[in-house]
Amino acid sequence: MNNDWDFFITRFEALSKIDLKSYKRPQMERRINSFMRSVNIDNYDSFINLLNINKEVYRKFLDHITINVSEFFRNSNHWEILEKQIIPELLKDNKTLKIWSAGCSTGEEAYSLAIMCSERHISLSEPILATDIDNEVLEKADMGIYSEKAVQSMPPAYLKKYFKAEGNYYQINNNIKQMVRFQQQDLLKDNFGRGFDLILCRNVVIYFTEESKQKLYQKFCDALRPRGVLFIGSTEQIFQSRELGLQSIATFFYQKT
Ligand SMILES: C[S@@+](CC[C@H](N)C(=O)[O-])C[C@H]1O[C@@H](n2cnc3c(N)ncnc32)[C@H](O)[C@@H]1O
């Protein structure tokens, strides 16, 4: 079985460039096996062949393992801390902010940041960088069209101000769109920019191994400017943050020391 798994992750990386070794094996294997059952396949050899020839199954499989669920202003109480405590702190050092939403999925987090900046008249030194490994979610993000369900957590005043209703859908307005730049990137493999004031990486590392998480947090720390802040997800915690050069300044917020 070990060999089967090694065979599968090697062939899958050749197909997708995604390195499953950096993800927690038991959880990943369970998700993969449940997907294989749903397409009536019981061995990795046939499964990898299917992924190679059937684009639709391949696409569904990527969705299944990457889990793209997102929300506008997800965990609104943490956004309140961001707006009232963290942003004013960051603005003491810099008048314009450089911000990155890492693992942005379909764009809700990045557009929430843009709306917050617009509301608070926060200047950006460049458009908010929003990255994800998955090109298809980035295409959706770039379109900026959301269903009624997707915008249900949006404060009604913002929905009115920043979206245009089109049938059952809501299109984000161009001013907000222009504040965000979407880009494909694998957080586990690619190089990062430098000098960010604020990095959000929320609900992305859930299946990463401890080792790949630590390496990623080190890369984020290097990408932050001194006193820059990393904002993580509500079920996450950074172990040995001090050794990485990060200090907790509020729950889910770490500052580069
Ligand atoms: C659950 S969504 C999180 C969206 C948003 N950050 C939020 O909290 O609402 C997780 C995203 O992480 C992305 N992801 C997973 N592994 C990644 C990697 N190695 N590099 C970049 N993005 C990755 C997935 O494609 C998915 O869109």
Image (cartoon, grey):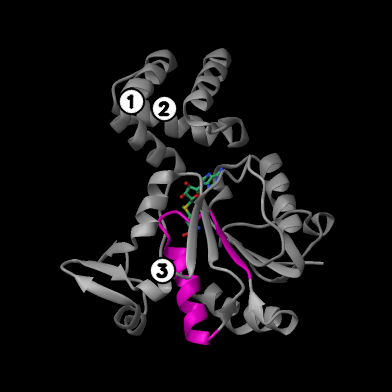
Mark 3 or mark 1: which is in front? 3
In three-dimensional space, the C-alpha distance between marks 1 and 2, rounded to whole angstroms, equals: 6 Å
Span of residues in magenta: 98-121
Taking the spot 57% from the left edge, 19% from the top edge, the residue there is 6
Regarding mark 2 in the picture, which secondary structure is present there?
helix
Quickly name the residue at label 3.
Answer: 177
Taking the spot 41% from the left edge, 68% from the top edge, the residue there is 177
| Amino acid type indicated by mark 3 | Lys
Dots 1 and 2: beta carbons under 8 Å?
Answer: yes
Instruction: Using residue 212 as the reference point, say whether residue 172 is left or right of it.
Output: left
Work out whether mark 3 precedes mark 2 in sequence or the reverse, and give the earlier one: 2
Quickly name the residue at label 1.
Answer: 37
Regarding mark 1 in the picture, which secondary structure is present there?
helix
Would you place residue 223 above or below residue 26 in this image? below
Between residue 152 and residue 164, name the one nearer to us. 164
- Where's residue 141, x and y in %? 39, 57
Dots 3 and 1: beta carbons under 8 Å?
Answer: no
| Amino acid type indicated by mark 1 | Arg
Taking the spot 50% from the left edge, 34% from the top edge, the residue there is 28
| Amino acid type indicated by mark 2 | Asn
Instruction: Determine whether the beta carbon of the residue marked 3 sits less than 8 angstroms from the nearest atom of ligand 1.
Output: no
Work out whether mark 3 precedes mark 1 in sequence or the reverse, and give the earlier one: 1
In three-dimensional space, the C-alpha distance between marks 3 and 1, rounded to whole angstroms, equals: 40 Å
Question: Which quarter of the rendering shows the C terminus?
Answer: bottom right
